Image: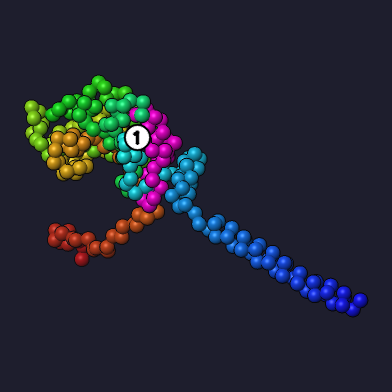
């Protein structure tokens, strides 16, 4: 009987190994789960965050990357990387993107980018806005500018219309140089948006840059066509809180000699 008791006690002592092994297995599973939760796909996380923020009317951010993909198609969302906020929501831009996507030719001549300057709507001039060497808007440009006016009417930001040309001088044109031509084109686009579409003129300004700010090097006719463009820039909102008040130095007024003589002693 005594030998039987010894065997039972020896068997009970070995059972603690099973409990210890179960605990080690659970700890390993726990730490694997914690590690997997700590590793995130940052790009997918940013895309999800931008999608959610845009759906609730948030602001979009970017560092100059195009909303267009390399194949010319519009992407689902802009790049949510560093950069100043343009103050216009993705939800506001969506109708314009859908409108451009409906027309294959228009899709190849328009792109929207987000940069530190703001949201930039780039439109190639040739066969879309103007005839060669002219600044009068073509009839086919009115529907596009009308759709853009609907977008701009929903933002309170300042808006700058910029005219750009290639490096070739104007041919058979009433404008002596690219400076006058680019300025006239930007001004005519601005006047249409303000005078015909009733947008707030205090938000707008026009600038003509001639050929000094090419989008691509002027090395061939294809690149020159890309440089002949008009850009509508939705500028970032002004941060009034960061504007420091000007401090005027204490300057004593200068008294003229005649006034000194007229003063009573």
Q: Mark 1 points at which residue?
A: 73
Closer to us: 158 or 89 = 89
Closer to us: 24 or 236 = 24
The residue under the point 21% across, 31% down is 125
Q: In the rendered image, is residue 181 in sight? A: yes
In the image, residue 83 lies in the stretch drawn in magenta = yes
Residue 218: image quadrant is: top left
In the image, residue 112 lies in the stretch drawn in magenta = no
Mark 1 neighbour density, 10 Å: few (under 14) some (14–19) many (20 or more):
some
> In this picture, is 42 found above or below 96?
below
The residue under the point 34% across, 39% down is 69
Q: Main secondary structure of the magenta part?
A: loop
What percent of the width, then of the height, locates residue 166?
15, 38
**Is residue 212 left or right of 142 when viewed as pictured?**
left
> In this picture, is 176 found above or below 217?
above
User: Going by the picture, which residue comes out furthest to the right?
Assistant: 1
Badge 1 element: loop
What percent of the width, then of the height, locates residue 193?
30, 29
Closer to us: 62 or 199 = 62
Q: In the rendered image, is residue 204 in sight? A: no
**Is residue 156 left or right of 127 when viewed as pictured?**
right
What percent of the width, then of the height, locates residue 141?
27, 25
What percent of the width, then of the height, locates residue 65?
33, 45
The image's colouring method is rainbow
Magenta segment range? Answer: 73-100
């Amino acid at each position: 009987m005594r030998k039987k008791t010894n065997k039972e006690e020896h068997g009970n002592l070995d059972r603690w190994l099973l409990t210890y092994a179960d605990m080690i297995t659970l700890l390993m599973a726990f730490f694997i789960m914690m590690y997997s939760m700590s590793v995130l796909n940052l790009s997918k996380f940013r895309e999800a965050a931008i999608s959610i923020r845009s759906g609730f009317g948030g602001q979009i951010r970017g560092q100059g990357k195009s909303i267009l993909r390399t194949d010319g198609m519009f992407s689902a969302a802009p790049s949510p990387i560093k950069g100043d906020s343009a103050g216009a929501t993705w939800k506001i831009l969506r109708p314009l993107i859908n409108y451009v996507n409906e027309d294959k030719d228009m899709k190849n001549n328009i792109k929207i980018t987000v940069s530190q300057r703001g949201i930039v709507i780039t439109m190639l001039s040739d066969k879309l806005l103007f005839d060669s060497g002219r600044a009068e808007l073509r009839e086919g440009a009115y529907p596009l500018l009308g759709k853009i006016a609907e977008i701009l009417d929903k933002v309170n930001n300042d808006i700058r219309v910029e005219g750009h040309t290639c490096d070739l001088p104007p041919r058979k044109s009433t404008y002596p140089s690219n400076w006058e031509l680019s300025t006239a084109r930007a001004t005519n686009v601005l006047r249409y948006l303000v005078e015909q579409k009733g947008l707030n003129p205090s938000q707008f300004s026009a600038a003509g840059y001639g050929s000094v700010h090419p989008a691509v090097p002027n090395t061939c006719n294809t690149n020159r066509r890309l440089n002949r463009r008009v850009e509508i820039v939705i500028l970032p909102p002004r941060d009034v809180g960061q504007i420091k008040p000007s401090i005027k130095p204490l300057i004593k007024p200068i008294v003229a000699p005649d006034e000194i003589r007229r003063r009573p002693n």
